Image (cartoon, rainbow, N blue to C red):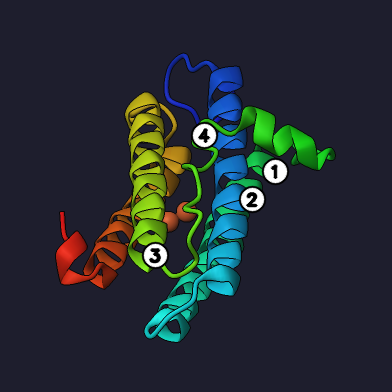
Amino acid sequence: MELEFIGNVDKGKIVEMLLSAYADEWIAAYYYTLTAYTIKGPLSEEIGEHFLKEAEEELNKHARMIADRLQDLDVDPPRDIAKLWDISSCKYPPLPEDPYDVDAWLVAAVKAEECAISVYRKIFEYTHGKDPVTEELAEDILRDEVRHRTELKNLLSKAAKV
Ligand SMILES: [Fe+2]
Ligand SMILES: [Fe+2]
């Protein structure tokens, strides 16, 4: 038993959850970037900038934190980019057809954040009291994803408010 774990843990299950979350982060970063480059209309410039900022946090903060934790566990990220889609549990909600329907792009992103929130809540619950390092990672990222969801919801137009 490695020193960092408390009691019996299924390390394979933790690795599986982390790899899946790593894939979710790359996919969210890709779709947020795509959204920034696709949406059109009066507020698209400002909202696009927000999407780029969030994409950066998913990739350069969250995916990096997970990759670092996987390195602690002697696991490298998948070499085949197609594998990221396979192992992602969130993937991404269907994209709106209309680039001017910015609300619909925001709603897709809110759903993506809700999926991320449930993923990190599960990792937190699974590692709670057993793997404090991963538990803290899940708590940190969960806090960011909740903030992302709030920020995205606040960008919805009045008509689209849920
Ligand atoms: Fe994230
Ligand atoms: Fe996020």
17 lies left or right of 111: right
Q: Tell me the distance, in whole angstroms, between the alpha carbons under discs 2 and 4.
A: 15 Å
Q: Is mark 1 within 8 Å of ligand 1?
A: no
Q: In this figure, which residue is indicated by the disc labeled 3?
A: 101
Coordinates of residue 106 in the picture (x, y in percent): 37, 60
Q: Are marks 2 and 1 in contact (CB under 8 Å)?
A: yes
Q: Secondary structure at mark 4?
A: loop
In the foreground, 116 or 152: 152
Q: Which of the numbered marks, if any, corresponds to residue 71?
A: 1
Q: Which of the numbered marks, if any, corresponds to residue 97?
A: none
Sequence-first tag of 2 and 4: 4
151 lies left or right of 24: left
Sequence-first tag of 2 and 3: 2
Tell me if mark 2 has few (under 14), some (14-19) or many (20+) residues whose alpha carbon lies within 10 angstroms of its own. Answer: some
Q: In this figure, which residue is indicated by the disc labeled 2?
A: 68
Q: Tell me the distance, in whole angstroms, between the alpha carbons under discs 2 and 3.
A: 38 Å
**Is residue 114 shown to the viewer in this render?**
yes
Amino acid type assigned to the residue bearing label 4 in the image? Glu
Please identify, in this view, whether the residue under mark 1 or under mark 4 is nearer the observer.
1
Coordinates of residue 65 in the picture (x, y in percent): 56, 54
Q: In this figure, which residue is indicated by the disc labeled 4?
A: 4
